[in-house]
Amino acid sequence: MSDARQAINAARAVGDELANPQALEEAELLIEAASRALSEGRYREARSAAMAAKRSAMLAREASLGVLENRDFGVRNVGATLARLTDRQQWYYWLCEWRNFAIYLSRRVVHDNCLQNAATLAYTTLLSIVPLLAVGFSVLAAFPVFEPLVDQVRTVIFTNLVPATGEVVSDYIEHFISQAAGLTVAGIAGLLVSALLLMSAIDKALNDIWSVRNRRRPLYGFMVYWTVLTLSPLLIGVAVLASTYVGTLSAELARGPRQLLASVTPFLAQAAIFTFLYSAVPNRRVPLSHAVIGALLASFMFEIAKGGFAWYVAAFPTFEVIYGALATLPLFLVWVYVSWIILLTGAEFTQALSGYRNNRPGALGDPAMEFTLTVHLLGHLWQAQREGRTVSLKQLVAREPDAGETALQRVLQHLESARIVQRTAQGNWVFARDPNSFTLLDVYRSYPVVLPEAQQCRVDSDADQRLAALLKPVDRSLEESLAVPVAEVFSDGERERT
């Protein structure tokens, strides 16, 4: 009861003049019904009424903030909505939006195991950094225009590799690269495999962030990896070339703007590499604007972290005191780990720009309504089959805005594992077998799902009405069969043994 009461009080606190009075009144009536049922021992009915009351109160709260204008891909009429709010309520609205976005982003970082993936990538980087740099420098050397700039590119890379101890690390790595130049064909092949393993780990981490389960074919994946390996050093070379050109401009260009351009150009090249990673590596369409914004954020965080790391190492020489001459190794490991955290956080931010709105579930996002959502999805697939077409996830999100993309993906994965639906080569969804060959009972038994109560079903369509009618006798049967105190179940068994 307390959860529903708190939701009602929260709805009223937002603004009684804008709250939905009908929903609030309905919530109050349901609370009274739930209290009555609880006092009479009808626990199942009391729980259902309390849940319905909480939903009504939350609807009233959202209506007061104007976020029910359109649940399909967010609020389209934001301007018209905010025009009806006072200045204080507008600030509250945007604060709630940013708070919810930050919560969503932080939960995604935890859910996708970004810290663990960053640790894995940092370890893989140790094995792959020499072949990666060897391939990169070879690519630059293949272009005559970049040949005079190879030393400058090395300086840029090693400066960013470890801000505080770049000279020591660069000496070791250059020695390793020179040793790698004398390897046989088999040794070079092994180094390339190590580099591709790192790209494969990046591919897995980014596809997990975008919840992609269908990986690319090996040939396409190799082409993407090779493009990243070859394009990244070229972008760095272009940045160094542009910086050199800016530095040679005539004195007509003021010293301040010239220094600004020289410092911003590598930053933009770094952002371009991140943009390419965020847009090309995930095996799904990522809006270019979102990839650019995420890349700029990651580059900005990278610059802040670089300065902060250099300051920390200089101000607190803890590693040097403990490890002495070997302090470079743990510092290098820590910085590589931090760098991967930043890259993955930027990817999470890029995904959240589109995923936040699509993953704000309504009533159908509730796990208790999963069976209803399953029936809805089967209905969309049935209609598509009649019309001779397939259905994409984007289309399903648009048709079921109250569910949220996460809930839709969860149901589709369950149905796919039960061999009820399957993906096409294009990644769309179709029936895996004739819908006349299985029943709702087969769907229910195919994977663990919670049956909704008849009164919880929406009546937006004829199919919803028929589903509610089918569930009514199920509710009655459950109430008659399971309305037995737990103690009585065990006491009956005890009496039978005696």
Image (cartoon, rainbow, N blue to C red):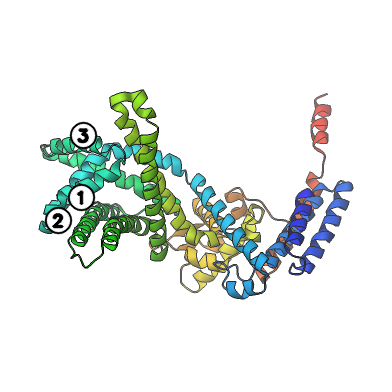
Residue 213 seen from this side: no
Image point (61%, 50%), residue name: 445
Q: Which residue is mark 1?
A: 153
Residue 172's disc is: 3
- Residues packed near mark 2 inside 10 Å, few (<14), some (14 to 19) or many (20 plus): many
Q: Which residue is mark 2?
A: 146
The type of residue carrying mark 3 is Tyr
As drawn, 201 above or below 19: above
- For marks 3 and 2, give the CA distance: 24 Å
Quarter of the image where the C terminus is located = top right
As drawn, 38 above or below 95: above
Q: Does the CB distance between marks 1 and 2 fall below 8 Å? A: yes
As drawn, 283 above or below 487: below
Image point (24%, 51%), residue name: 229
Left or right of 130 in this view: 267: right
In depth, the one of 324 and 281 nearer the eye is 324
Return the x and y of residue 237 as percentages of the image width and height: 20, 55
Q: Secondary structure at mark 1?
A: helix
Q: How many marks?
A: 3
Return the x and y of residue 53 as percentages of the image width and height: 77, 58
Residue 227's disc is: none
